Amino acid sequence: MSDALFTDFYELTMMAGYFDAGTADDVATFDLFFRHPPDGIDQVVLAGIETVVDELVDLRFDDDDVAFLASQEHFPAPFLERLASQRFSCDVWAIRSGTPVFGNEPLLRVTGPLLQAQWVETLLINRVAYASLVASHALAVVQAANGKPVLEFGARRAHGPNGALTASRAAIIGGCASTSNVQAGQRYGLPVSGTQAHSWVMAFPSELEAFRAYAEVFPADCVLLVDTYDTLGRGIPNAITVAAELAERGHRLRGVRLDSGDLGELARGARAQLDAAGWHDVDIIASGDLDATSIAALERADAPIDAYGVGTAMVTARSDPAFSGVYKVAEVAGRPTLKLSSSPEKTSNPGRKQVWRTTTGDIVGLDHERHEGRALLEPMLRDGRRCSDTETVDTIARRCREAVAALGDDGHRREIRLSDELAALRTRLIEQFRD
Amino acid sequence: MSDALFTDFYELTMMAGYFDAGTADDVATFDLFFRHPPDGIDQVVLAGIETVVDELVDLRFDDDDVAFLASQEHFPAPFLERLASQRFSCDVWAIRSGTPVFGNEPLLRVTGPLLQAQWVETLLINRVAYASLVASHALAVVQAANGKPVLEFGARRAHGPNGALTASRAAIIGGCASTSNVQAGQRYGLPVSGTQAHSWVMAFPSELEAFRAYAEVFPADCVLLVDTYDTLGRGIPNAITVAAELAERGHRLRGVRLDSGDLGELARGARAQLDAAGWHDVDIIASGDLDATSIAALERADAPIDAYGVGTAMVTARSDPAFSGVYKVAEVAGRPTLKLSSSPEKTSNPGRKQVWRTTTGDIVGLDHERHEGRALLEPMLRDGRRCSDTETVDTIARRCREAVAALGDDGHRREIRLSDELAALRTRLIEQFRD
């Protein structure tokens, strides 16, 4: 099934309207952007660009799509014929995924027939907003963890199958070390990891038997979940027994995982017992509804934790699950335009724009201007065809790491300003539309 | 691509462990349930059952899946051969989608080889939890709207493509009248609706020209978005002009949509202007970040609103986006088992269970017991093959409507109790595991 119909119905009614009004082929430019970061996020990391660009290549209404629209008895036949005969043929410029980005900067710019640029609004926002939301949460969690590995395992809590796949990919872009979602690993070439759940321990007559059985099959990569019954009273002592048995077989117990209770206290207790038994190199992995805030607290308290597992809070973006990406028309038939709002900050920026990243801040200006710094919007599609290379997740994750470092400690506070020319155009248009 | 690998990596390591320990074919029973409703939800509506059951039919690891697992250099070859040679062959019993359900009731029960029952944990939770979350929010919104139509248009805010499709389907199950997502309409046979966005209005030299152009192409189904510039100062007067022009052509303006500002105040102002012009039958549709709470407030204030559009809060389940479905082993090889927890309410219920809905409350008991009332868990798969009919979304939505009505006004407070036999078994096992 094509994704031509992954669109709100009103996009189609508007497209039919443009077609009827004779403006369907007016060249229009739309911008995808956000106004402010979601709650709980200081630094937004852009993600999902490269995947949505791939979806736009050769996007077209197939016979089933057109038949479905005809069945709605809502659209004039000539309009449906137009849909059937076209493919997506716009130019798309975008900032590369993995780049830290800011409010009111165009992240992706579509220029082409008005009818087509309108068509892809829902698809673009859906794909980019959620991927960016998770990448941003991942960065926040990874920063809170002070460089310790963060393992993503949110598959079961993510919103639907593709929600989970998108989340896993975005988590790696934001800096996570691995995902638990095997399908995401397969599809995107991500490192996968995981060991055992409480059900493993419960499936054996005793915890010690469960631990021994796991060490039997994975002696070289054995991490034991120690909180099924009583973490410090039974779980850690049983793990220490298995560590000794593994050592006799020439293996090292790799770690224990704490998944409930006061993780700081339990980590200290577990560390003390393990150290007393001589197992200084057995890692402690903590999980259980962690987020950037709770991980930062554990780190401040110097909890002896070596790696973190995060799921729910990151993949559901619990602090603010609705990242309000918007897609606004900025120019039609050479005429710059904007959406007025009673709150000045919600009034959009007119014209075909570019973003320059300079040492002192970002400048949003008109495309034909020249500024110091690097132009962030790059051509991705020309006439609907790929004109950029496809990047691996590794490359994107590295860009994120390096670009965040380059922004410095207070990077998320950097100044974003309009160029003088854009500011003047905006003021003029606001006055014109107010009349 | 099959969904065999839509699973957390640790499910596979545990499956390898069972295989190695010789328990892979022990008959196990797992339960899918939740402990308490998500924040902001009184009544949980079950959804996603029929779709996940379809996914389980003939679920198998294909050659690519096995090759990917082999590439991880983690799993013994005999285990991979076992995966390659099997299909999902468990029995699955479940409560029908659309049923109002309660905490600590088994919603879906898997019985079969331990290795297989473990395999599908991530898939089951992922599919059922999010669908149920949105269906529950939809019910809450529809109840708040006092029977006025609620239109779902959250596609752009949902978490990824399937998040959006799942959300649209679940919204209809919970009682919404239509979705904006055309692909969801196509795939699931849902009613779709929508008219125009601000970009439509902005694409014309003036709002009036935009309204006229829309009325030209959709004279019989014309709803005008009136808040792009100034709702009461320009939007409604322009809509009234177009209403008169439509009337001359023998058509009726169907409605106006308010999408920002104080919706109650604006609705009153718009109603007054429309009525003064004689357009009593032009509907007012309100949208703009609405949820059950804000809709209830508008209804309490008698705002003259005829239909509501909801998106973000419902599809992202903003009040609590992480609905913690759990999947726990309840029996292995004829031996009932449970997961102990320091908080008694988190200790799971052992044994192969059934739920009876009686006039006074729900009873959770063991499968062989007999109780008054209707047994809610029905056979869906036997030996991995469908043994139940596939239901349409219409049928499921009707079940929801009727079952919620049957529970009565305080239905969400109904008593859920364990049968005496189950309670005794649970107590005995808790003491046994505590030793």
Image: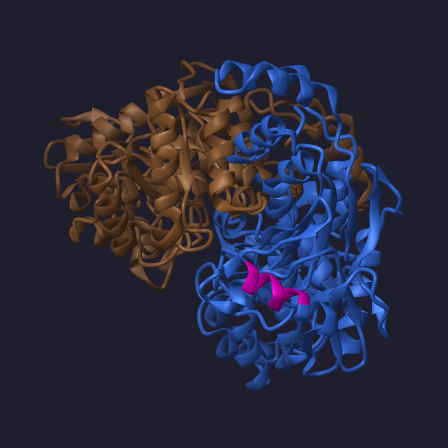
Chain colours: A blue, B brown
Magenta region: which residues? A425-432
Residue nearest the observer in this picture, B328 or B105: B105
Whole-percent x, y for residue B133 in the image: 39, 44
A188 with respect to B354 (left or right): right
Asked if one can make out residue B411 in the rendered structure from this viewpoint, the answer is yes
Whole-percent x, y for residue B298 in the image: 23, 52
Tag count: 0
Whole-percent x, y for residue A25 in the image: 71, 33
Residue nearest the observer in this picture, B435 or A409: A409
| Magenta stretch, overall SS | helix
* Occupied quadrant, residue B193: top left
The N terminus of chain A: image quadrant = top right
B279 with respect to A207 (left or right): left
B377 with respect to A412 (left or right): left
Residue B394 on the magenta segment: no
* Occupied quadrant, residue A428: bottom right
Residue nearest the observer in this picture, A4 or A311: A4
Tell me which residue sits at (52%, 57%) in the image. A312
Tell me which residue sits at (16%, 49%) in the image. B302
